[in-house]
Amino acid sequence: MSWSATQYSKFERERNRPVQDLLAQVVHGAVTKAADIGCGPGNSTELLRARFPGAVITGMDSSEDMIAAARKRLPDIQFELADIGTWQGASGPFDVILANAVLQWVPDHAALLPALLAKLAPGGSLAVQQPDNLDEPAHRLMRQVAEAGPWAAKLAGASREARHGPDWYYRILTGVGATVDVWRTIFHHPLPGGPGAVVEWFKGSALRPYLNRLDESERGDFLARYEALIAEAYPALPDGTVLLPFPRLFFVATRPADGPG
């Protein structure tokens, strides 16, 4: 799946809100090494460095475009092109591993999360934030357009897989010995520009798997149908602003200080 750092960064201030909230809950004495996995264009890496200015930080992402943007933004930080599912974390163990709005794209969390915890130093924390919005109109409508259009066969299986609830993550993580803080927040992002701004937001994230499978003409038709439905689901306020509700799930899993979980 191809990603666009430019498109993703259009709403950087709004996308930074969740990672700022997440990092504020990471409590650790002396952070000497930290990693940002699925770092995107480097906005989350920059916030990670600001939170732990004394740490040696590395970043990784599976998108060449995102890594190029991150390296340009933060030339003094080492970024690598890698896949989270097979990432070795050779420069670890880490005091903090940050996974901001990325694990929703990675399968088999039951195996993935213990593997990430194993890359932490004793007392280290895995800090995760992921969208929890598959039941929101924006997602339901993109699935509807995908299934009802002439591209239905092309787009079969393009939607993001459903993820688990807070209790599932709590059980998995405490089951391997971690201490877990889990919470859910609904952000309400004011987006100037009417319903088209909602479409622009998701063109940088959830719409990518659909649009990547379509040709240029099909993309235009898909987006036109989608925006018409979005305009009904997210009516603009009198000043033209659309308030986009966005639920997100957070957890910080901390490895025991006296050894592996």
Image (cartoon, helix red, strand yellow):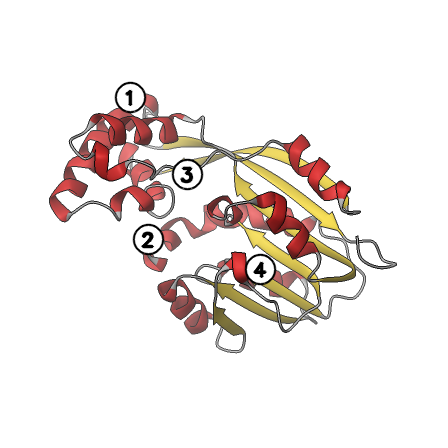
N-terminal-most mark, 4 or 2: 2
Residue shown at 61% from the left, 65% from the top:
49
Query: What residue would you read off at disc 2?
Result: 7
Residue shown at 57% from the left, 50% from the top:
19
N-terminal-most mark, 2 or 3: 2
Give the numbered dot on residue 232: 1
Q: Is residue 25 above or below residue 82?
A: above
Residue shown at 22% from the left, 27% from the top:
228
Looking at the rendered structure, the kind of residue marked 3 is Arg
Query: What residue would you read off at disc 4?
Result: 47
N-terminal-most mark, 1 or 3: 3
Looking at the rendered structure, the kind of residue marked 2 is Gln
> Which image quadrant is residue 67 in?
bottom left
Give the numbered dot on residue 122: none
Residue shown at 15% from the left, 31% from the top:
150
Query: In the figure, is residue 83 to the left or right of 230?
Result: right
N-terminal-most mark, 4 or 3: 4
Q: Which of 125/117 is in front? A: 117
Query: In the figure, is residue 28 to the left or right of 78?
Result: right
Residue 187: give x, y in percent of width and height: 52, 35
Looking at the rendered structure, the kind of residue marked 1 is Glu
Q: Residues within 10 Å of mark 1 (few under 14, many from 20)?
A: few
Mark 4 or mark 3, which is nearer to you?
3
Residue 200: give x, y in percent of width and height: 30, 43
How far apart in space, not on screen, are marks 1 and 3 (Cα)? 23 Å
How far apart in space, not on screen, are marks 4 and 2 (Cα)? 20 Å
Query: What residue would you read off at disc 3?
Result: 160
How far apart in space, not on screen, are marks 2 and 3 (Cα)? 19 Å
Query: In the figure, is residue 27 to the left or right of 64?
Result: right
